[in-house]
Structure formats: C-alpha cells, structure tokens
C-alpha cells in the first residue's frame, strides 16, 4: 500500500457525483450484554442510512441478551435481523465466524460491539468514502472514538494517530478499532483466504495487518463516529491511564507482545502469496530478524522500517527490539 492513499481525507472520498445505493451488513457479537445492548440497537435504528441488515452471533449469553435480540428481530423482521449462535471460543473466534461465513454477503461490512453507541451518520460517512474507492482494492474505513463510562458520560477521546496507516505500522501496532471498522468485499476476500480458524490476539489488528499486507487502503478518520464504552473493569488495562501504560510495559517485558506477534506471523503466512512484493520483503525481514542474535536483530528490524504512531511508542519498540521482546 502506498502512503498517499492512506493519507486521503474524507473530503476526497466524498467529492464528485452522488453514489448509488449499497447495502451494509452490521456484524454484531454479543455475550451477556443486556445492560447496554438496547442503546446500541437503538443507534442502529437511528442511522441516516437505512440499507443495513444486522447479523448477530451470540456466544452463549445467560442474561436477557437473547430476549432483547429476539424482540429486535420481531420488530424488524428476519430478513433485516438474523440471529445465530457463536462458536463459544472467545470474541476473536466469534467475529471471525461472522466475517468468514460465505452466507453473510453484502457490499460492505461494519463490525459492532454490544455496548457502544453509534453516531447517526456512522454508516453513511463510512459508506461515502468506500463507495468512491475502487471496488477491487481492499479498503477499510475506521475512526477515532468518543470515550464514555458505564453511565454514558464522555471523558475523553481515543488517541489521534497522525502517521499514515501502513503494513510497516500494522506489524507492531493496531490503530484501527474494530468497533469503528467498515470494510468492503475485497477485504473480506482476503480474510476468507486465511480462514476463520486462526488463533489471534485481536480480530481488528488482523484485519489491519491483512489489508495493508496485500496493498489495500486504510482510511483513518480523525472525527469520532462511535461512543466507545470503557468499563471501569478494563480502564486500567487500556493505554488511557498511567496504570494502564505501566501494565503495557509489563506485558512487553513478560513476552505477551512477542507471543501476539508469533500469532500474527503465522496468520500472515496464510496470505503471503497475495502480498505485494514490498510487503513480502518487509515481512521476510521482520520474521527473520525477530529470532536473530542481537546485532542482526537490531539491524534487520531497523531495516524493515517498522514504526509505531507516537514517539513514546517508538522508544518502547526500540527497547523491545534490543531485549528480544518483539
């Protein structure tokens, strides 16, 4: 993927002639989400783009989630809302089971968590950009998020990333939140090639990796389109607090990041033939250098030109390279 397309502004995506109708499949994964799910379902109904349909994969809820979903299906009809049972192997497997199901077919696919709230223009904004991208080019729309607590009170925004989305970034960082992602059929074809049986740390990181590896385009919108609910129980695990950032350093030291990269490397090997030549060279250098001795490792990974989005992130990356934690 060249850096120019990834720097494209939304205005560039919206310019020109009116776009024809197209459908969006909302892929929602649920598990015991009854407390917050009604607000998310209401935000689907409030979308200013009506040509959506919802496919829900519930991973074994034992609260009121199933009843809420059944009521929503009754209200809109089974052609608009489809319900299914998930694989019960965690959220990554649940999302992959939806994404990689050939029976779920649409022009575009929007991933959804159960406890967020979408802006009314989320789908239309994403779709307007995607409609003006070449259909054969794997293309992702993603955006910043508005951060809300358990009570729905806004307390900040996710980080604003300013460096271009790129495979060299995706190898060491996930910037595209799955709850903001909308992507085209060309992206899904890449994911289908790899399959749903992957073991991954995160499905959204994988989608960013796979799309950039094959030369696709990632548009990162600086304008938030989702209110992302950050619960008190997982705030410390995020990078939004000092405690959270300290925990990230501990995870690096304890080889968690290295283990995640091991999973990503194995996943990328499934789509290696479809990669661009530039991505193949970068991937080969990254894969080989990670296991080399100190000087070849540092030199090789620096030559691969991998990068994170912030100065502090790149300092941590350099430390990880030296300590063989990448």
Image (cartoon, rainbow, N blue to C red):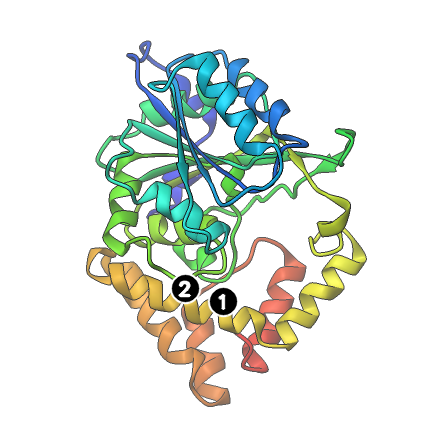
Residue 49 seen in render: no
Residue 303 position (above or below residue 58): below
Residue in the image at 27% along x and 31% along y: 105
Residue 266 seen in render: yes
Q: Position of residue 234 (x, y in %)?
A: 71, 51
| Distance from Cα at disc 2 to Cα at disc 1 | 6 Å
Q: Position of residue 218 (x, y in %)?
A: 41, 41
Residue in the image at 45% along x and 16% along y: 74
Pick whichever, 1 or 269, lies toward us. Answer: 269
Q: Name the residue tied to disc 2.
A: 264
Q: Quadrant of residue 266?
A: bottom left
Pick whichever, 197 or 15, lies toward us. Answer: 197
Q: Position of residue 256 (x, y in %)?
A: 57, 71
Q: Secondary structure at mark 1?
A: helix
Q: Secondary structure at mark 2?
A: helix
Q: What number is the disc on residue 260?
A: 1
Residue 230 position (above or below residue 201): above
């Amino acid at each position: 993927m060249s850096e120019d397309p990834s720097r494209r502004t939304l205005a560039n995506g919206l310019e020109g002639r009116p776009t024809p109708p197209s459908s969006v499949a909302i892929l929602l994964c649920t598990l015991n989400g009854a407390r917050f799910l009604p607000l998310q379902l209401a935000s689907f109904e409030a979308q200013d783009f009506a040509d959506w349909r919802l496919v829900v994969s519930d991973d074994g809820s034992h609260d009121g989630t199933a009843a809420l979903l059944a009521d929503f299906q009754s209200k809109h009809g089974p052609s608009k809302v489809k319900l299914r049972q998930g694989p019960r192997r965690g959220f990554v497997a649940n999302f992959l089971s939806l994404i990689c199901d050939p029976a779920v077919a649409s022009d575009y696919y929007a991933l959804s968590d159960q406890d967020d709230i979408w802006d009314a223009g989320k789908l239309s904004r994403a779709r307007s950009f995607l409609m003006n991208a070449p259909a054969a080019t794997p293309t992702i729309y993603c955006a910043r998020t508005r951060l809300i607590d358990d009570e729905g009170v806004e307390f900040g925004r996710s980080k604003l990333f300013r460096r271009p989305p790129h495979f060299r970034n995706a190898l060491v960082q996930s910037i595209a939140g799955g709850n903001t992602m909308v992507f085209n059929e060309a992206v899904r074809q890449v994911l289908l090639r790899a399959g749903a049986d992957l073991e991954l740390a995160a499905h959204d990181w994988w989608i960013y990796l796979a799309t950039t590896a094959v030369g696709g385009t990632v548009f990162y919108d600086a304008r938030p389109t989702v209110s992302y609910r950050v619960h008190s129980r997982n705030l410390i695990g995020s990078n939004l607090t000092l405690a959270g950032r300290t925990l990230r350093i501990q995870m690096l030291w304890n080889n968690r990041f290295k283990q995640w990269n091991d999973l990503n490397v194995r996943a990328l090997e499934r789509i290696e033939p479809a990669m661009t030549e530039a991505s193949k060279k970068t991937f080969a250098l990254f894969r080989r250098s990670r296991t080399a001795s100190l000087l070849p490792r540092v030199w090789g990974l620096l030559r691969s030109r991998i990068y994170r989005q912030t100065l502090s992130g790149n300092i941590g990356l350099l430390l990880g390279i030296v300590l063989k934690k990448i």
